[in-house]
Image (spheres, rainbow, N blue to C red):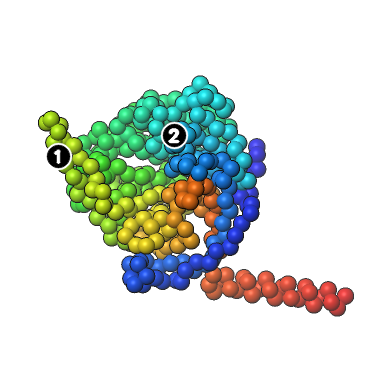
Amino acid sequence: MRAPIALSCAVCMICSAASKLSAQDGVDSHRILFQGTWKRSEIGGRAFIATARPELQIAGPHAVYVYDYAASRLCALDSTGRVLWTTSGSGGPAPEFSFGNPSDIKLDAANNLWINDPYRRFVFVVSDQGIVQQLIPALRSAERIVLRGSGGFWLWDEAIRGGGFTMYGANGARAGEIALRDSRTGIDTLAPIVRVPLLAGGPNANSPIVETFSWSSDFLLWSPLDRRPVTVHGVEPLSFPTVLAWSVGGNQRVRIPPDATRGVLSTVVGDSLIYILFSGTTKYKGRLIDTYLLKNGRYAGSYLLPEPVITISRLGGKFVTTTTRPAANVQIWTWMPVGKRASARKTAFRTARREARIRSWRQ
């Protein structure tokens, strides 16, 4: 078995902002920032051309896996940015398959990638070596996937009235449906174009499923026991936009207003926290990572990245991000908090180093 990669290459230190930003700073007064500094590693510069679209990514213990929509390929990067393998339908370890338009990617405990491709109507199960393990027939109407502890998975399916999950067993067979029916907030009455969610599963089978939305700060926590959602209001209030609707030749057309504000850009779940990369109405679009307790959705504080990104995932205690500005890249961010505990550790380290220096002088 390969050892986990040590994601440390050429790095730079970046200071964070103050612990609390006021409304005058462009952030609502409820948002509290963690204090600390960032250490950044850039690993994607050699893997993508400047115009690449690395808009789908997930980090694993052996590599960072990124799908580039511009090149229609999935690639695995090591800690130096070296491409371990790619697959684009014309080369790589599995040239017999190609993606249509993947919409979601997850990683299981065995480091297999689960890639939902509604355009091809398949869920691809791909090993960390880039080899296709399974092709599971899926749904054109389902754009998001979440893995379950039983070995099965759920797809968010807009063919279910009001939206909901189509469940699959470990053998890839359909095992039932769960409709949203969220009468308290009315999410189930919204046009599908604005309520297509992002899904993130917890660390075990008893953890809630987190369902966030690209056009709102509200999100849902799905209980694995009663399979009913609890609605949580995000720290920065943002309501779903009203879609524009018109008729052409008797056919209904809808679109999201061009001035609508994006909400959630990316969501990942850790052992006890939900991490939400948020756009919103502030000048810090794409730089804010809001955290919430997984058990109840309570707001826990926010990180402020020095620059905007478009996706996040977690690798141990680090954040993995992708960006397209000024050029496509993949970054590893290490957070180093400051405060009483951090100051105490720093003081103890300095004291020990000073005492060691004194001992060497005496010798």
Residue plotted at (37% across, 44% down)? 199
- Name the quadrant containing residue 246: top left
Left or right for 201, reference 41: left
Q: In the depicted view, which residue is nearer to us: 60 or 151?
A: 60
Q: Position of residue 48 (x, y in %)?
A: 53, 41
Toward the right, the furthest residue is 363
**What SS does tag 1 mark?**
strand
- Cα separation, mark 2 vs mark 1, equals 34 Å
Left or right for 160, reference 107: left
Left or right for 329, reference 291: right
Q: In the depicted view, which residue is nearer to us: 249 or 28?
A: 249
Q: Which residue position is annotated with label 1?
A: 246
Say which amino acid is labelled 2.
Ile
Circles 2 and 1: CB atoms closer than 8 Å = no
Closer to the N terminus: mark 2 or mark 1?
A: 2
Q: Is residue 300 above or below residue 138?
A: below
Q: Position of residue 137 (x, y in %)?
A: 38, 25
